[in-house]
Image (spheres, rainbow, N blue to C red):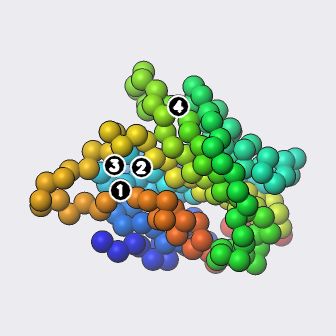
Amino acid sequence: MEPTRDYPLFGGAFSAILPPGAIDVSDLRPVPDNQEVFCHPVTDQSLIVELLELQAHVCGEAAARYHFEDVGGVQGARSQQVESVQSLGSESLALRSCCPEAWVLSGKQQVAKENQQVAKDVAVHQALLRLPQYETDVLLTFNQPPTSDNRSSLSPGNVSPPPWSLGDFEQLVTSLNLHDPTIFGPQ
């Protein structure tokens, strides 16, 4: 299966390359206007692109940690652990002309799915693209639950795409492109 190229996001204001089999969650349930959410057709993996208010009070690595902790709080994470935070060179980004600062973070959050009591450690990979001229932080998140939750069928006739990889997430991050800056309002 091929990735979906130039998939329109936020009404076409952005586009990106999505991994094979990505399902637009807004076709299944309501999604906030500032988010684009995609799920894997077989596993519990998800990808989220969020447009957030620029958190100018935090800079550098602290900004990446801030957003990781904020997401964990919103999801009711019982514990959170940052494993690594690294600067991401803007030369690799399609958004390089308007993104002077980018960070990637990997960590774990212990969260329970909706209507479930048992919390599980979920690997969380995030990329924070800071767009100060638009007063916006773009947060991209790749959630990887434990592999036992990834219900991929191994039957010979299975045509489901394989689980997504960090390479798929990197492609999403580096391909994210802005087409219509009016999405941010009057400048």
Dot label at residue 163 = 1
Dot label at residue 43 = 3
Q: Secondary structure at mark 2?
A: loop
Task: Locate residue 174 relative to residue 87 in the image: left or right.
Answer: left
Q: Earlier in the sequence, mark 4 or mark 1?
A: 4
* Placement of 111 over or under 67, stated as above or below: above
The C terminus - image quarter? bottom right
Residue, disc 4: 110
* Residue 128 figure quarter: bottom right
Q: Are marks 2 and 1 in contact (CB under 8 Å)?
A: yes
Q: In the rendered structure, which amino acid carries the disc numbered 3? A: Thr
* Placement of 114 over or under 161, stated as above or below: above
Q: In this view of the protein, can residue 34 be seen by the observer?
A: no
Q: Are marks 4 and 3 in contact (CB under 8 Å)?
A: no
Q: In the rendered structure, which amino acid carries the disc numbered 1? A: Pro
x and y, in percent, of residue 33 in the image: 59, 53
Residue for point 49% across, 77% down? 6
Residue, disc 2: 45
Cα–Cα gap, marks 4 and 1: 21 Å
Cα–Cα gap, marks 2 and 1: 8 Å
10 Å crowding of disc 1: few (<14), some (14-19), many (20+):
many
The N terminus - image quarter? bottom left
Cα–Cα gap, marks 1 and 3: 7 Å
Q: In the rendered structure, which amino acid carries the disc numbered 2? A: Gln
